Amino acid sequence: MKKIAVLTSGGDAPGMNAAIRAVVRKARFHEVDVVGVYHGYEGLYKGNYELLDIGAVGDIIQRGGTKLYSARFPEFKEDDYQYKAIERMKQEGIEGLVVIGGDGSYRGAMQLTEKGFPCVGVPGTIDNDVPGTEYTIGFDTALNTVVESIDKIRDTATSHENTFVIEVMGRDAGDIALWAGLAAGAESILIPEEAFDIEDIVTRLERGAARGKRHSIIIVAEGVMNGHKLAKQLQERTGVEIRTSVLGHIQRGGSPSARDRVLAGRFGARAVELLLENKGGRAVGVKNHVVIDYDLKEAFETKHKADLSLYTLSQELSI
């Protein structure tokens, strides 16, 4: 291959810029040109392309968000849009594509590969919910952001002897809630992968109050229940005022952690290697600290599983 392209799609994640940088610089090391596609699959379809040299990706490794921007483009599910995108890329001399994003972005990459255009997926999402890899780009940074926020909320909760429900991102996956809750010493953690009994939460609060505890932190993933709704239900059962904090999009922003930058660099470089080896339809990931690649279909045929041993541990430590 003499020319490849790279795009970011779906929700932004800290470390995407580091992955873009790695793709461009690894490719240029092998004397391969790289085209940046702006605004995800919408830009791919509309031809919003720019040739990226080494200088174009300078001073971005430490920046959050994505230099190439992102966009939702549901129309790309249709074959006509995919064939048009392939036609545009071929007109530009592009022979392969690196897609940085979550499992939804992978679906587009898989469909392009099935139509004869080789693509490689790089997992970039704060939710850490892409099957086939233990960690995704952006998860570590988001986790640190959430833990820092919880620590600050705990300061005021302690000062005013309040109980807080903190809602974090995670529509279908509870990794942020689970890891942050364990790291921050939350009394209760609610995740989509595990059923919960609200009476158990009430019992924990009452047990804590009985031994003189005046504040508590409860973490809920957005996919389980709205934080305000949970707080209302707990307040009705305990008669104690429950405060709510919804962390929202702050979880997506910020300079990527060192771990995310290194992970992004390794993933981006491996994606380029796969394309140069003419191995389309692959996704990169990490298992046991080793960078791997696997069939993109695995991201759809298997389901992300939370580490429930962490959930059990959190319950044992929050007695």
Image: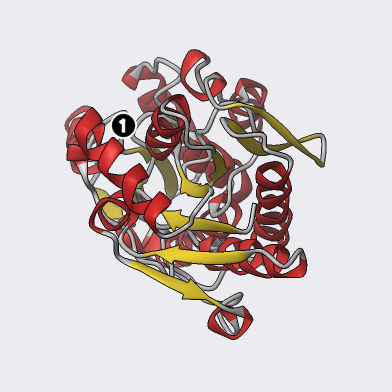
Residue 166 seen: no
Q: Is residue 8 above or below residue 78?
A: below
Q: Residue at x 37, y 64 (%)?
A: 250
Pinpoint residue 302: horizontal percent, then vertical percent. 53, 15
What percent of the width, then of the height, locates residue 301?
49, 13
Question: From what the image shows, is residue 312 above or below residue 210?
Answer: above
Residue under label 1, please give it.
Answer: 223
Q: Identify whether 130 is placed above or below 157.
A: above
Residue at the image position 29 percent from the left and 37 percent from the top:
82
> Hey, what amino acid is under mark 1?
Gly
Residue 87: where, in percent of width, then height? Answer: 33, 46
- Quadrant hosting residue 121: top right
Q: Quadrant of residue 104?
A: top left
Question: Quick one: SS at disc 1?
Answer: loop
Inspect this view and state whether residue 160 appears: yes
Front-most of 305 and 30? 30
